[in-house]
Image (tube, helix red, strand yellow):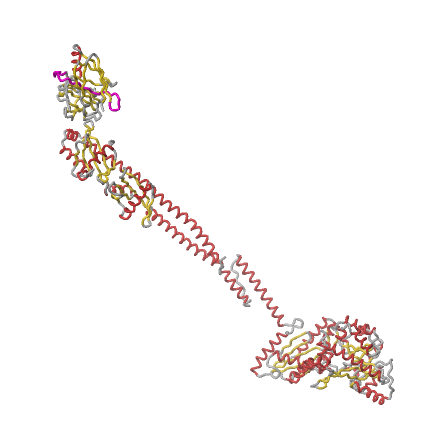
């Protein structure tokens, strides 16, 4: 199993924009599950081996209406994420995931210290007070990643070159098998079918 | 229909039958309803029990689930799980298992990589297939609800609760063995026995656990297997006479596994309660029947007791106890019945007294009757047997009573009888003496302590009384009585023989025309001889033992012989000569007299024919009896005889007595008129002894009157007789009749008669009855003595009476036997 990338999605997009100037390609993605349905919040990460690690910008996951918002978040390794509580009730955010074990004991407002996610992997977020609150953070070792919208589609700009990629379906502990893809030209369409 | 001896039995039977029938009619449906009710109660209990059972399991599940959830939600536990801290997980499970009394507790991670069980659970999951089965169970049981599973051949109730962090990272599974504790808990709540039965792929149906006894459990296992195999829905099973209702519920079922729970309820406890109720009902019914029976017995006894009393009273009446009146104690129907019985008793009493009076009294005279008399004699004999005293019995008969009755009327006869009775009563010797009327004109007297001398004195006294004319209804009438006397103990030792002997003596006195005769044994012999004679008489006619005798008859004034009266004599082969008085009366009674008359007529005609040959033109008179006068053939028979012998009607005369005319006057008159029409000469015989009215005689076609010898015999000495004869002759002449006198025994009388103008006469002085052949001899001698020529012409009237007996004793008999 490989957790390749660290950068957050936003940083990835930014990098893609940079690369666009020199032969950048726009890749349109659709992810389907075993039944052939388009999947929302599916995460796809691209790895090119040559892109150097940069310090990613910090992120945040808001707790509002007793929900993690966004529910699925993709970040690059080394990203600091804050968990501001916008509800009137207090929350006790925790994770027992091996990628990041942490606990924000009962708090309200914005915690003083953000949480650093320095290890690639899936972090499942929960609230000890509210069992229904579930959130996911995909920590990837790459700045190139994308999350499907509610149409099951996503779009990413990548420079031409060889990439390998992995896809996650929400709720799954493990990513799909690593695939190879060659990005050339202006636009590429990528259809990913997960078993 | 059942026969009852007593009404109260019938009443009791009827009412008790109804009562018992009603009770039974109630008890039977009641029993049916009770049993039905018991079954329904049992079934309801089953339903309730099942619901409770289901509820219990749900409740158990719920509470166990909540308890398990507490563990699964514990942050520390989750942290231990998340950090794969097996030791901590195991200790936490153990701690919780103890808290909720689970037999099995373990944790399975979501990726099934980690399975941690408590020490106790090890056995449950140590089996070969245990792990997989558990995993399978959990996968199938994502909802976390109740689940029964067979794990390694043992049944468990499993609860699986997810451990979330916050996604499901594993499962806490708590297992409760299906064991005695569960069964007992179910039983405690449902009051039903519960049995768990399972089938595994290794073993066939087997008992898991249960509260029922061993035997029932075994039966249930077998039953359940059958039911399961045949997919039946059995609801009942019987064991040792007890019916169990069953509810079978499947708790777990796979292809070759099954876990069933069987709830058993028995109807028996309900039935016992209801049976107790039923027994009480039966007891109450029996009690009611007993009380009712006692009441019925009491009431019916009260009702029938007076009836029983009346029955006894009626029995008393039947026994002849009329004296005691029946007590009437009530005014109801019984009282009315008692009153009616009383009236009946009165009536019966009166009637029996009257019957007694009739039985022993002669209503006409007020004297005792024959029955009373024989009883009186019997009692007197009993009394006298000891005292050696004597008794005398007299039987008294009134001569010629019948003609008196007929002539002067029945009232007169009755008065005469009463008078005779009075006379007898007045002359008895003592108070104890008894006078009775035995028959129409026959009386009897019992003289106590009287010997023969006293008895004959009494008879003489009676005789003297009757020598004077008796005054009845203002008329003087001559009564002659005959008496027979029998003495006790000489003439008989019992009343019947005494009476018979007295009667015999009486008959003898009639025959002998004596006032009384004392019985002696020679009379008895005579009578028996008489009886023998009767039987011999028919033979005598056939064998010609009879002889024709002729008693001559003459003209009183000229003494010329006119002819004679034909008489009969019987020469018996053993007894010699028998006179008519010994057999004529009986011949009349038996009817043989007709044969005798025929014989006489024939013989008289033969004799007349002989005389005619000898040149003697005389006539013979033949006596006719009552029976002859009733024989309508007689005129023709006589005509035939006369013709056969060449005789005219003038040579034969016929004599008839007053009495013979009286029996059937109409018939007799027809015969007499026919005979007269034929030209036959008819004479009235024994005139003066009967009571014929001359006026009646005058109407008859008779030419001659024969005065009875009793008036003639002593008329020379007795002026009274002479005057009777004189007046009779005058009367007869006035009526234009020839008068013949009988019983002329001396010349004086003959001359006297001649002076009185009597036409003809007969008697010993003229000639005794003689054999036919001697008649011509007498005729010669008579003519020689009287110096008259034999000139017997047609104008002489001869009367020859063959039955003119001397002394003529048959008259009383003839009269007596008019009937």
Nearest to the observer: residue B599 or residue B448: B599
Nearest to the observer: residue B575 or residue B521: B575
Nearest to the observer: residue B42 or residue B89: B89
Nearest to the observer: residue B247 or residue B576: B247
The quarter of the picture where residue B601 lies is: bottom right
Residue B149 horizontal side relative to residue B767, left or right = left
Residue B302's place in the image compared with B459, above or below, is: above
Residue B778's place in the image compared with B288, above or below, is: below
The quarter of the picture where residue B667 lies is: bottom right
**Magenta segment, prevailing SS (helix, strand or loop):** loop
x then y, percent, for residue B174? 21, 36
Residue A80's place in the image compared with A22, above or below, is: below
Residue A92's place in the image compared with B59, above or below, is: above
Which quadrant is home to the C terminus of chain B? bottom right
x then y, percent, for residue A108? 17, 21
Residue A44 in the magenta stretch? The answer is: yes
Bounds of the magenta span? A33-56
Residue B200 horizontal side relative to residue B426, left or right = left
Residue B435 horizontal side relative to residue B608, left or right = left
């Amino acid at each position: 199993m490989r957790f390749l990338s660290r950068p957050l999605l936003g940083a990835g997009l930014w990098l893609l924009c940079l690369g666009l100037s020199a032969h950048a390609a726009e890749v349109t993605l659709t992810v389907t599950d075993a039944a052939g349905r388009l999947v929302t919040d599916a995460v796809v990460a691209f790895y090119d081996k040559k892109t150097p690690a940069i310090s990613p910008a910090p992120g945040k996951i808001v707790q509002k209406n007793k929900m993690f918002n966004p529910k699925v978040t993709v970040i690059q390794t080394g990203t600091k994420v804050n968990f501001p509580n916008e509800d009137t009730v207090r929350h006790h955010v925790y994770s027992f995931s091996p990628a990041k074990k942490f606990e924000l004991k009962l708090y309200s407002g914005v915690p003083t210290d953000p949480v650093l996610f320095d290890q690639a992997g899936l972090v499942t977020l929960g609230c000890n007070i509210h069992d229904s609150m579930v959130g996911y953070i995909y920590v990837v070792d790459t700045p190139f990643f994308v999350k499907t919208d509610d149409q099951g589609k996503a779009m990413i700009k990548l420079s031409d070159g060889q990439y390998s990629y992995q896809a996650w379906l929400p709720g799954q502990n493990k990513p799909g098998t690593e695939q190879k893809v060659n990005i050339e030209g202006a636009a590429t369409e990528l259809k990913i079918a997960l078993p | 229909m059942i026969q009852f001896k007593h009404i109260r039995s019938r009443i009791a039977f009827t009412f008790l039958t109804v009562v018992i029938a009603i009770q039974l009619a109630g008890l039977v449906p009641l029993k049916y309803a009770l049993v039905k009710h018991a079954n329904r109660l049992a079934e309801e209990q089953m339903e309730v029990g099942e619901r409770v059972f289901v509820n219990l399991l749900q409740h158990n599940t719920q509470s166990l689930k909540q308890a398990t959830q507490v563990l699964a939600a514990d942050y520390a536990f989750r942290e231990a799980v998340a950090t794969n801290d097996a030791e901590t997980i195991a200790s936490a499970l153990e701690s919780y298992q103890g808290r909720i009394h689970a037999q099995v507790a373990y944790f399975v991670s979501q990726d099934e990589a980690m399975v941690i069980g408590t020490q106790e659970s090890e056995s449950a999951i140590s089996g070969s297939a245990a792990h997989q089965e558990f995993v399978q169970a959990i996968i199938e049981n994502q909802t976390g609800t109740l689940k029964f599973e067979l794990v390694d051949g043992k049944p468990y109730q499993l609860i699986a609760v997810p451990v979330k962090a916050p996604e499901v990272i594993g499962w806490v599974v708590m297992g409760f063995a299906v064991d005695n504790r569960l069964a007992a808990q179910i039983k405690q709540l449902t009051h039903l026995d519960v049995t768990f039965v399972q089938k595994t792929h290794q073993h066939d149906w087997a008992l898991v656990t249960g509260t029922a006894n061993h035997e029932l459990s075994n039966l249930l296992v077998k039953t359940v297997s059958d039911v399961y195999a045949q997919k039946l829905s059995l609801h009942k099973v019987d064991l040792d006479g007890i019916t169990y209702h069953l509810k079978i519920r499947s708790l777990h079922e796979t292809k070759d596994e099954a876990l069933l729970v069987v709830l058993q309820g028995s109807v028996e406890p309900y039935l016992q309660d209801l049976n107790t109720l039923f027994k009480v009902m039966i007891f109450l019914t029996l009690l009611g029947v007993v009380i009712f029976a006692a009441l019925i017995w009491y009431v019916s006894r009260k009702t029938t007791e007076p009836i029983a009393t009346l029955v006894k009273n009626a029995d008393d009446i039947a026994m002849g106890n009329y004296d005691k009146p029946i007590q009437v104690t009530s005014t109801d129907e019984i009282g009315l019945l008692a009153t009616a019985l009383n009236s009946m008793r009165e009536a019966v009493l009166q009637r029996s007294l009257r019957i007694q009076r009739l039985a022993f009294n002669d209503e006409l005279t007020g004297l005792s009757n024959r029955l009373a008399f024989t009883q009186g004699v019997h009692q007197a004999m009993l009394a006298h047997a000891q005292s050696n005293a004597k008794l005398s019995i007299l039987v008294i008969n009134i001569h010629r009573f019948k003609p008196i009755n007929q002539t002067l009327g029945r009232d007169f006869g009755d008065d005469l009888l009463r008078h005779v009775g009075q006379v007898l009563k007045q002359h008895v010797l003592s108070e104890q003496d008894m006078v009775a009327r035995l028959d129409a004109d026959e009386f009897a007297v019992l003289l106590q302590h009287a010997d023969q001398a006293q008895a004959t004195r009494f008879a003489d006294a009676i005789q003297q009384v009757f020598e004077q004319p008796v005054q009845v209804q203002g008329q003087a009438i001559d009564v002659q009585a005959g008496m027979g006397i029998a003495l006790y103990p000489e003439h008989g030792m019992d009343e019947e023989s005494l009476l018979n002997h007295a009667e015999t003596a009486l008959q003898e006195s009639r025959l002998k025309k004596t006032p009384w005769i004392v019985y002696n044994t020679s009379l008895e012999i005579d009578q028996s001889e008489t009886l023998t004679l009767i039987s011999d008489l028919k033979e005598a006619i056939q064998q010609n033992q009879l002889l024709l005798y002729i008693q001559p008859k003459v003209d009183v004034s000229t003494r010329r012989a006119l002819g004679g009266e034909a008489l009969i004599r019987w020469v018996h082969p053993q007894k010699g000569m028998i006179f008519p008085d010994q057999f004529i009366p009986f011949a009349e009674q038996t009817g043989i007299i007709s044969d005798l008359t025929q014989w006489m007529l024939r013989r008289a005609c033969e004799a007349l024919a002989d005389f005619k040959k000898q040149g003697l033109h005389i006539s013979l008179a033949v006596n006719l009896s009552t029976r002859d006068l009733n024989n309508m053939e007689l005129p023709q028979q006589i005509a035939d005889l006369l013709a056969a012998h060449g005789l005219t009607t003038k040579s034969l005369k016929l004599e008839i007595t007053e009495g013979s005319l009286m029996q059937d006057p109409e018939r007799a008159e027809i015969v007499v008129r026919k005979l007269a029409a034929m030209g036959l000469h008819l004479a009235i015989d024994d005139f003066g002894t009967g009571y014929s009215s001359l006026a009646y005689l005058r109407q008859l076609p008779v030419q001659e009157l024969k005065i009875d010898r009793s008036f003639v015999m002593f008329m020379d000495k007795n002026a009274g007789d002479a005057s009777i004869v004189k007046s009779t002759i005058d009367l007869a002449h006035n009526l234009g009749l020839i008068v013949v006198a009988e019983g002329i025994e001396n010349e004086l009388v003959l001359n006297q008669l001649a002076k009185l103008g009597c036409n003809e006469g007969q008697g010993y002085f003229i000639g005794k009855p003689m054999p036919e052949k001697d008649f011509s001899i007498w005729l010669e001698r008579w003519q020689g003595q009287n110096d008259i020529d034999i000139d017997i012409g047609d104008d002489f009237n001869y009367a020859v009476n063959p039955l003119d007996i001397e002394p003529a004793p048959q008259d009383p008999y003839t009269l007596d036997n008019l009937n």
